[in-house]
Amino acid sequence: MVTRKNKIELLSPAGDLPRLKTAVAFGADAVYCGLPQWSLRNIREIQFNEETIREGVTFAHERGVKVYVTCNIFPHESHIKLLKKDLAKLNKIGFDGIILSDIGMLSLAKEFAPDIPIHLSTQANTTNSEAIKMWQVLGVKRVILARELSLLEIKKIHEAVPDIELEIFVHGAMCMAYSGRCLLSKHYTGRDANLGDCANSCRWKYQVKNKAPEKVFVQEESRPDDALEISEDEHGTYFMNAKDLSALDILDQVLDSGVVSVKIEGRAKSIYYVGMITRLYRQALDSLYAGKKVDEKLFAELDMVANRGYNHGFLLGRDGYEQEYDVAAIKPNLDFLGQVSEVQDSKFKNYDIKNSLKITKLKIKNYVLVEVKNKFAVGDEVEIVTPDQIVKTKITEIFDNGSLVSEIKKPGEMVEVSFAIGEGVPPYSLIRRKKN
């Protein structure tokens, strides 16, 4: 049985400041983030800059949450000069770890960011204890193991090198290549996945064609003159649209493997995804720590988040790994309407989101400031999701710039909303509506 004595870290993605705050609010023990120029998640609309990443570190540390900075690109020679300057800047911010994959960047981090513990990225494809021993010699404090390992292999690695921290992914998208070492995006679009600019070419629609005897090619439908030959080995052919990883139902086995941190993929995913998936794993971990079974309701909530179908990846061995042959993603039967940004009532001015997240009864009407994600209207029946509750209620009033309105349509607007429950709603709560 897992006890709090050997509590495992829940590590959530933080693509930008709002996602970082959401992850913290919904129970992450640590978050990982990055600056776009050095990170393998370079999404223009979702990113940090130096100012917001400093704010994020302060926000997290004030609430007892660690922050790891990701610098896991494979840098070219032209990057080195700027990299030295930026590593020196990162060293002053107070990160709890720096995630690296390139051995040259590791050397520079030791020189220019000596105060930050070094974590080895999953992009380094570490699959055995002998490699870990060498990384230890080079100064690595934690290894994020390759996704291609089984729990049995992970346990054996831990037994061989018990004095180094091990981290694994337990949820999120799986790459069709070896932990991201893919050239499809570069080949088709010129966008380099190893520099954080993946076009997700593996998710496109392809056709398989025989163009010569005993030769099979895969062809992207809009590029008929650019076919790629498919090759096989003794293990078979594994390619393209992998299902999503979810270890929620085998989390007890994960905790027995010797890892110190379980990681959720998704810095480019939505705020709703970050909050919901962090919430599910937080509740599951807490149940296991208390000697209880994971609540069956949590598994149903997995499908309330868009996914490609779930499997265990390689955690239970190769037989547990599956490809997703249906190209369509599984979309939940609900709309994410918005997120509570700020509670207007004075009772919540200094709200402790880490320890006081239950919806609290108020005797007066309470308005909350909501950042709109999808259109909604007065009278809509909605669900408010907090870290430990899902409350059904109805929208009773909407104020847009001080004017009472019947509906709001434009995403990105900030509006004041009241609900029929007449209760205080915590900041960072998620508001969703089931589709008819």
Image (cartoon, helix red, strand yellow):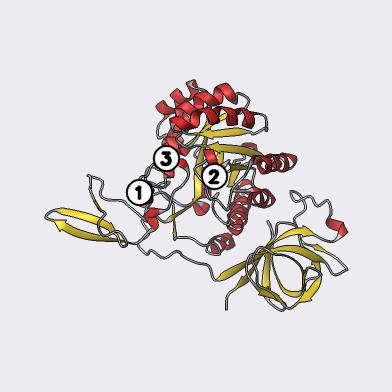
Where residue 148 sits: x, y (%)? 39, 43
Residue bearing the label numbered 3? 152
Question: Residue at horizontal 59%, vertical 42%?
Answer: 32
Where residue 7 sits: x, y (%)? 62, 40
Amino acid under label 2?
Answer: Lys
Relative to 132, 51 lies left or right = right
Determine crowd level at label 2: few under 14, some 14-19, many 20+ residues with C-alpha closer than 10 A: many
Relative to 271, 397 lies left or right = right
Farthest left residue in view? 213
Q: Is residue 161 visible?
A: no
Relative to 114, 369 lies left or right = right
Q: Which mark is first along the chain, 2 or 3?
A: 3
Under tag 1, what secondary structure?
Answer: helix
Q: Nearer the viewer, residue 17 or 172?
A: 17
Residue bearing the label numbered 1? 184
Q: CA distance from mark 3 to mark 2?
A: 18 Å
Residue 133 badge = none
Residue 263 badge = 2
Q: Which mark is first along the chain, 2 or 1?
A: 1
